[in-house]
Amino acid sequence: MVAEIETVPVPLPGRAYDVRIGDGLIARAGQQIAPLLHRPRVAIVSDENVAALHLQALQSALADEGIGSAALTLPAGEATKSWPHLTRTVEWLLDERIERRDVVIALGGGVIGDLVGFAAAILRRGVRFVQLPTSLLAQVDSSVGGKTGINTGHGKNLVGAFHQPALVLADTGILSTLTPRDFLAGYGEVVKYGLLGDAAFFEWLELNGAAAAAGDMGARIHAVRRSVEMKAEIVLRDETEQGDRALLNLGHTFCHALEAATGYSDRLLHGEGVAVGCALAFELSSRLGLCAQEDPSRVRAHLRQMGMKTDLADIPGELPGAEALLDLMGQDKKVVDGQLRFILARGIGRAFVTAEVPQDAVTRLLQDSLSERARG
Ligand code: GLY
């Protein structure tokens, strides 16, 4: 029996595309991508880890439909999202004579998706690209919505473009090749969707998150589909983040400071930082009297139940003091006119964006969390 494919449309005017979700989609990539092509040839960019696992499967699925492919394999890791690898990718695409009407495939996690999307955005002033996200984080967040870019010495994602993909193929079968830690890091972004806008989804995750982590395919597909639906809905309202799209940054202001404080190392993966950041954002919301005291406890209880990092105490190694963390938050690129914008919540599933957060409440929250960590 052929597994069913679920489709979430992203009907942006003039650049509408589908996110297709299903087990074993990579084996059907040729059928899925063929309708986009003007000639039977594509370029694939991947990284060493992903290419070793999935490149051959992708190339033979394309070949089954008579589609030829050339592949570039880059080093794995965040350092690849940089000027040198952008240059290398663009020059390689030109060497391969990729034309305006051709399609480039990004096969990998968020790093490859962001880098290749940006290369596609600037190559010949814009060629189409297909995202084939291989991490949970990329399937539920970075492959959808058209944010592309690289990091520079000044910070993460500071150079880039909005360039929507022509198609996203999220093969949930591929998730079984992730380490449990990487799966759970991506799950941090899944929980974020429930917390920011869908209390019923959060409840569903409380009941089914463990099954999804253990490999239940139906639960994985539902978790990815609902996350993508929510992201698509927000991107449709606010593609270029003038307003509502900032909701997707729930937990991220804390997360970015913690990632900077831990040197973007594997002491704290991005999705782990998002989970800790969501717990802190709910704690702050409760202290400001915006949501019930039970809400942050419920958020932490679910993260703990999943075996995830929940508090500052769960981050190994040294952390700077509250003032230094606050200072790192001030470097967040979401700062507008020097004002830190926070995503807070009036309850589970009821997040909102605000610049009205008393700084001393944030400092006290961080001080308390750091002292709990010290007592640990
Ligand atoms: N990852 C946040 C966004 O796409 O807006």
Image (cartoon, grey):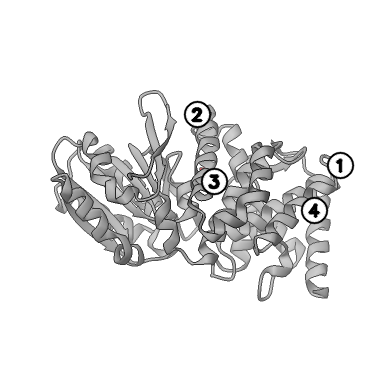
Badge 1 crowding class, 10 Å Cα cut-off, few under 14, some 14 to 19, many 20 or more, is few
Instruction: Identify the image quadrant of the N terminus.
Output: top left
From the top left corner, tell me how far across and down residue 110 is, in percent.
Answer: 44, 54
From the top left corner, tell me how far across and down residue 269 is, in percent.
Answer: 56, 63
From the top left corner, tell me how far across and down residue 205 is, in percent.
Answer: 64, 48
Q: Secondary structure at mark 1?
A: loop
- Which residue is at 41% across, 43% downward? 21
Badge 3 crowding class, 10 Å Cα cut-off, few under 14, some 14 to 19, many 20 or more, is many
Decide which of tag 4 and tag 2 comes sooner along the chain. 2
Relative to 123, residue 327 above or below? below
**Quarter assignment of residue 247:** top right
Is 94 placed left or right of 192 in the picture?
A: left
Q: Which residue is mark 3?
A: 223
268 and 23: which is toward the camera: 23
Q: Residue furthest front?
A: 1
Q: CA distance from mark 4 to mark 3?
A: 22 Å
Q: CA distance from mark 1 to mark 4?
A: 15 Å
Decide which of tag 4 and tag 3 comes sooner along the chain. 3
Q: Looking at the image, do the residues carrying marks 3 and 2 touch, with CB atoms under 8 Å apart? A: no
Q: CA distance from mark 2 to mark 1?
A: 31 Å
Q: Which residue is mark 4?
A: 297
Q: From the viewer's perspective, is the residue at label 1 or at label 4 nearer?
A: 4
Instruction: Identify the image quadrant of the C terminus.
Output: bottom right
Question: Which amino acid does the dot numbered 1 rest on?
Answer: Gly
Q: Which residue is mark 2?
A: 236
